[in-house]
Structures are given as C-alpha cells and as structure tokens.
Image (tube, helix red, strand yellow):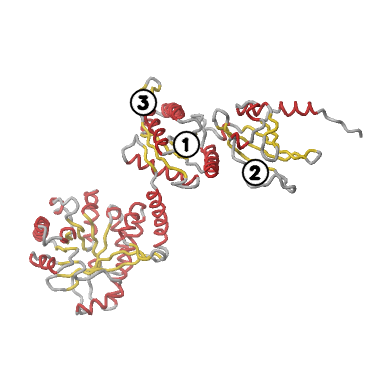
C-alpha cells in the first residue's frame, strides 16, 4: 500500500484550531508553538508566549517534578489537575496532559494539552469564587514558589460575624444575597495575584503571595474589615455585618497547607473572642499549646482504659480528739511518658471535653472500693471524701449512680462524703438542692468545698442539706498577717457552728495557722502540716505513726 504524506501546513492548521489549549515545548520547557485556544484561555498573545518557558510565564507548577527529560530512557507522561494563572491573574483549574513527541531524526518535544474542567469542580456556585478544591491547588502552587524563591506568603481565615442571625431572622434568600455581595467586596480588596475562596457557609480563605512585610497583610485585612463594615442593601433592607480575620504566615506558622490554615483558623477564633470586627495574627506559642493540648486530650481518653489514673489520699485531723476524721481522695495521672501530671493541668481539660463524667464515676467507685478494702483489713472506719464537679452535681441520675456504686462495693453510705463547691451549687441552685437532698437521705455526708471563694451567700446555706463547710486555703494562707482574712475565717466558723455544721480548714501548713484554728474552735484541719497526700498502700504507716487502733468510730 502506498503511504500518504500529510501536508505540514495541514497539521499546523489542525493543531492551531484544536478546541483544547496546546503547547509544544522543547525539553527545557521553552514554548515553541502555541494554539489559539490556549491564547484565548490564558489571555496572553502569541508574542508573549512563544520563546518563553512555562515556569517563566508563571502558568502553573512544574508537573514533571524531578523527572529528567534529557535522559534517553525517559518516557515522560503526566496527567492531572493544575491551577493555571491567566495573564489577568485569574485562576482556572485545568486538566493537563503532558506527553513526549518523538520526531524522525531523534528530535524530542513535549506536548502540553489543557482541557477545561466543569466550573463546579473548582468554583463555588453561589459566589463564583474559587472553592476549597481550587484553593488547595493555589496553596500547592504558593508553597512550591515560596520554597523555591525564599518568599513569605499570608493566609487569611475570614468568618462573617452574626451571619447566622441574618439567615435565621430574614431567611436564606437574604443570606445568599449577603454572601454574594460580601464576596464581591472581598475580591475588590485584594491585590493583583491574591486569591480568595469560599470554604463553605460564611467562611472564606485568602492567599496573599510574596508578602514583603507584615504591614502589607495588615493593610489588606483592614481594607476588608472597612469594606464589609459599610451597609449592605438587600431587597431594600439595610443590613450591617462585620468579619473576624485570622492571619498566618509561611513559613513561621507552618510549612504545609494544613498547618497554615489551622493556625489562621485559631487566630480567627481569638479575633471573635476579642470582640469581632478585627484581625488577629497567629501565634506560634498558641498553636504549639493547642497541639500539646490535643495530644493531652487523646492521652486522657486512654488513661481510664489503661489504668493510668490513681488516687492519693490526704487525711483530715479532728482537732478535739486528734483522730483522722476523713480521707480526701485526690486524683493523680501517671502518664507513661510525661510522668505524674498535676490535676490542675488535666481536670479543666476533662471538664471541657466531657471526660470529667466518666473520670468522676471512676473516682467515686475507686474511693469506695479502697475504703471497703481498708475496713476488711481492720483499719479504723473513716469517711472517704470525693470532689464533685458541677457537671456531676447537675446530673439528675447522680443519686442512682452513687447508690449503684455503694451497692457494688458494699460500702455503708455513712462512710462516703461528697464535696461540692459553691460555684457548682449556684449554677442551678434549685436542681442542686434537690439532688443533694436525695444524696443526704441516702445517708451520705455532704460538704461545701472552697467556701468563701464563690458567692458566699449566707442565705442559701440554710437551704442546703450539708454537714460540713471547708474554709478555702486562700483565707488560711496569711491568716496570721491579714486581719481581714482572720475576721472572715472567724465569722465562717461561728456561722457554721450556729447552723450545727462542722468546719474544716484547708491548707494548714504552719503551727501558727494551727493555733489560730484551735483558738476559734475549728473542728478539723487538712494540710501539709498534718500530712501530704499519699498512695493507699501507705495508710498503715500513717496509722501506726498516729497510734490509732482498729475500733470503728462513727464520724
């Protein structure tokens, strides 16, 4: 069969008129030929493109990576999504295919073919801004360029303040219009080459490449705040709205997309807490603290399962007969890597995450089991005191849970004491009184902990079914020198005795503090002067030291 020779001019015309953007480059990336569709897509002229490199034009990141096109064994082929920056700096997500063309005479070229993706793939349908997917490509591009050229760039995480109120009050049609108008204002505030994307809802992300100094980013942020502060007119309705902005910088606040966005997000939430309608910079120490906090939270969730929690016990001394009146159970966390962790470091975290409920039940059960075990061994029967958080106290099924634990451990309710703070009671006084009354009816000893630091309302004391007041250590600490603290402490003791309540002074550490408590006939003390907290297996040593006998004594 006779071969047919195709006219080169015809091949060029086919190439030129293809409805896909196409480039022919040499192995160094220099553009030799370009078709009309690519020129239309990019906004460049033929003169601006031919003879220049793909990277030089700043079209997109190099898709070939570390592959060596000059190698005789290379069979270069790549396909995937790239973010193409047009001459006017607009961004479009394209599907790119790179392949090798081998011409007779061993000449080798690269063919770049660009295909349009459907707008839904890279564009937010409501605001017409780039979407999350498109922004991730922008980030990849910015990271590569900043790393290569030793540049700094900024990320804004922006959230509209009170947008939910507009949606809920006026309806979603107003909310959608507000988002569209806000998007226009946001875009108008950016510099040439900046990118803004809608992440969803009323959240937006901005990318500001090649930041010379922090003031540049602050200038753009303030410009955005000022633009959004002007009234919006939607369906003849005047609406005011503001924004909160968090700013992070590459490479100081992270060297990857996720870290930078997270840092900016955290800064945005701090801006909201500061009062909204302002911007906040990411702080490395805040981010580091958040990361440590996350690690601590994850570890705390495992601590119960892996038996890392333990109880220490600190005795309370009855000043009248110099006997142990009760043992307060104090939680400790022994982390396998971090060692002993103070309750002050993990209890607030447990309360915030809700873990305090399961931890609290564990403490009650463990303390009851330990007390019953001490009794089986013939030690003097004494109360064991457990602190309750507000989360526990306001659980309406708390009495049932405590009753179940007492039944399981076979501990008589009179040997369990529950300590509750003033602030916990005052969160919902009516519910607290109801629950405490049920606990009291079960025969459980109840005390108010840290008395004097909360509301200190004398009227509510008559409503509470309690047995003991514990004076906070802050009053005891400088009772010898501070006349006001001395007066308050004496008043608390007198008040408690008039209400037939026992009084325990916490934090007694000196002989002078002890003498003051004896003078005012305080019932009991707790503190380092008498004993530091100790593990349960040290009780026998302490009892021997005290010279106590094993007979039971009602507490």
| Residue underneath mark 3 | 230
Residue 532, x across and y down, in percent: 24, 69
User: Of the numbered discs in the image, which one, if any, rests on residue 103?
Assistant: none
Which residue is the site of mark 2?
64
The residue at the point 71 percent across, 26 percent down is 17
**Element type at marker 1?**
strand
Q: Earlier in the sequence, mark 1 or mark 3?
A: 1
- Whichever of labels 2 and 3 marks the residue nearer the N terminus, that label is 2
Q: CA distance from mark 2 to mark 3?
A: 47 Å
Real-space Cα separation, disc 1 to disc 3, in angstroms: 23 Å
Q: Quadrant of residue 374?
A: bottom left
Q: Which residue is mark 1?
A: 208
Q: Secondary structure under badge 3?
A: loop
Mark 2 lies on a secondary structure that is loop
Position in image of residue 489 (x %, y %): 12, 59
Residue placed at 22% from the left, 69% from the top?
315
């Amino acid at each position: 069969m006779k071969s047919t020779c195709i006219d080169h001019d015809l091949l060029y015309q086919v190439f030129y008129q293809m409805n896909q953007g196409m480039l022919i480059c040499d192995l160094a990336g220099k553009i030799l030929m370009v078709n009309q569709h690519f020129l239309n897509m990019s906004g460049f002229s033929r003169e601006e493109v031919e003879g220049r490199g793909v990277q030089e034009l700043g079209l997109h990141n190099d898709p070939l990576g570390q592959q060596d096109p000059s190698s005789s064994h290379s069979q270069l082929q790549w396909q995937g999504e790239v973010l193409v920056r047009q001459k006017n700096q607009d961004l479009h997500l394209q599907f790119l295919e790179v392949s090798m063309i081998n011409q007779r005479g061993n000449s080798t070229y690269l063919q770049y073919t660009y295909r349009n993706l459907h707008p839904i793939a890279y564009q937010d349908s409501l605001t017409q801004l780039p979407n999350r997917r498109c922004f991730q490509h922008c980030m990849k591009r910015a990271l590569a360029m900043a790393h290569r050229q030793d540049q700094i760039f900024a990320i804004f995480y922006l959230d509209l303040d009170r947008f939910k109120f507009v949606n809920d009050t006026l309806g979603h049609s107003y909310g959608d219009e507000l988002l569209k108008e806000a998007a226009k204002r946001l875009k108008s505030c950016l510099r040439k080459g900046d990118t803004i994307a809608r992440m969803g809802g009323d959240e937006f992300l901005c990318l500001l490449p090649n930041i010379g100094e922090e003031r540049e980013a602050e200038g753009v942020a303030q410009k955005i705040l000022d633009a959004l502060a002007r009234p919006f007119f939607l369906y003849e309705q005047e609406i005011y709205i503001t924004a909160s902005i968090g700013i992070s910088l590459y490479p100081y606040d992270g060297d990857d997309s996720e870290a930078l966005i997270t840092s900016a997000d955290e800064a945005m939430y701090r801006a909201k807490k500061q009062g909204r309608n302002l911007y906040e910079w990411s702080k490395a120490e805040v981010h580091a603290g958040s990361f440590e906090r996350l690690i601590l939270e994850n570890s705390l969730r495992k601590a119960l399962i892996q038996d890392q929690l333990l109880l220490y016990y600190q005795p309370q001394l009855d000043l009248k007969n110099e006997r142990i009146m009760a043992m307060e159970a104090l939680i400790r966390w022994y982390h396998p890597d971090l060692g002993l962790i103070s309750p002050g470091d993990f209890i607030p975290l447990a309360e915030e995450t809700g873990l305090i409920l399961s931890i609290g039940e564990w403490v009650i059960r463990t303390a009851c089991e330990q007390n019953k075990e001490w009794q089986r061994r013939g030690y003097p029967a004494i109360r064991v005191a457990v602190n309750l958080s507000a989360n526990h106290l306001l659980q309406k099924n708390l009495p049932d849970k405590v009753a179940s634990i007492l039944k399981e451990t076979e501990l008589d309710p009179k040997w369990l004491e529950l300590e509750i703070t003033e602030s916990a009671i005052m969160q919902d006084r009516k519910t607290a009184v109801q629950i405490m009354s049920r606990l009291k009816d079960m025969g459980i000893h109840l005390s108010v902990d840290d008395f004097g630091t909360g509301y200190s309302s004398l009227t509510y004391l008559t409503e509470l079914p309690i047995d003991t007041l514990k004076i906070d250590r802050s009053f005891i600490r400088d009772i010898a020198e501070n006349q006001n603290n001395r007066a308050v402490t004496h008043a608390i003791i007198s008040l408690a005795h008039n209400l037939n309540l026992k009084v325990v002074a916490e934090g007694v550490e000196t002989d002078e503090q002890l003498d003051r408590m004896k003078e005012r006939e305080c019932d009991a003390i707790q503190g380092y002067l008498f004993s530091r907290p100790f593990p349960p297996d040290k009780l026998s040593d302490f009892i021997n030291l005290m010279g106590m006998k094993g007979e039971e004594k009602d507490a």
